[in-house]
Amino acid sequence: MSVLQTKNVHYIYQSKYQKVHAVKGISYDFEEGKFYAIVGKSGCGKTTFLSMLAGLDTPTDGEVIHNGKSTTESNRDEYRLRSISLICQSYNLFPLLTVEENVMYPMLLRGEKQTDAKKASHAKLTDVGLNESYYRRLPAMLSGGEQQRVAIARALASDARIILADEPTGNLDTENSEIVFSLLQRLAHEEGYCIIVVTHDMAIADKADEVLRLKDGLLME
């Protein structure tokens, strides 16, 4: 069953000097329990499309639908807080918060008790292979692969069932890329998450359940 759909979505960047039609009429259904890869050359519209799925941008035309309701008719702040979680290439961890505090953050935003958030953060960090020796470290004390795993743990702590990732392995070596990919794949296949990843890494795309290939803003068959 589809948890996220796009129906003929377009996105146009308009400035005083130019007009760029970045996404051109993409329709697609995304389901729970699947790992999706979005691929294509730089400038083909991948990140713009992901941004619309995340509710960061609204389509110029068409609709993004979550559980039967258009995101343009929803409270998009609430949608981003509770329904989707975004993982970025740059990790976006809070530099002055510890690993534990970074993972607790979305739970505290939802109003959970500190003791419950702390306990849950430890469970999420265990899920991504980070033990208690990491809890008190700051992000600067971690490798790139470890920072990305903290970012994934924080995404899990958001309790969202849809995880969107923009080049999550772009700054990682081959070994850490495999670790991160395996984590995301396990979340889809064993935990029932809907995982949607924008990537240039064809090794990841080749292992995805479904691949969306974009070219000049169009979804290629």
Image: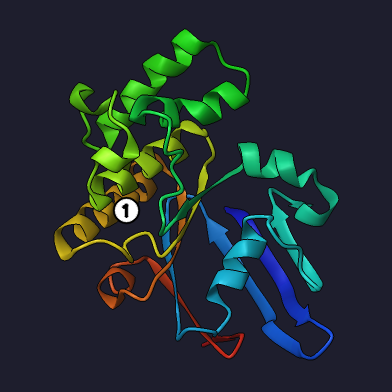
Query: Left or right: where does residue 19 sit relative to residue 85?
Result: right
110 lies above or below 3 = above
* Residue pictured at 42% horizontal, 44% vertical: 192
Q: Which colour scheme is used?
A: rainbow
Query: Which amino acid lies under the numbered mark 1 shown in the image of this protein?
Result: Gln
Foreground residue among 158 and 151: 151
- In x, y percent, where is residue 121? 38, 24
Instruction: Identify the residue at image location x=46%, y=31%.
Output: 157
Report which quarter residue 131 is drawn in: top left
Q: Residues within 10 Å of mark 1 (few under 14, many from 20)?
A: many
Looking at the picture, how far across and down is residue 67, in whole percent? 68, 48
Q: Mark 1 points at which residue?
A: 185
Which residue occupies 73% across, 74% down? Answer: 9
Residue 79 in percent (x, y) is at 69, 43
* Residue 12 position in % (x across, y down): 76, 80
> 111 left or right of 101?
right
Question: The residue tagged with tag 1: helix, strand or loop?
Answer: helix
Residue 118's quadrant in the figure?
Answer: top left
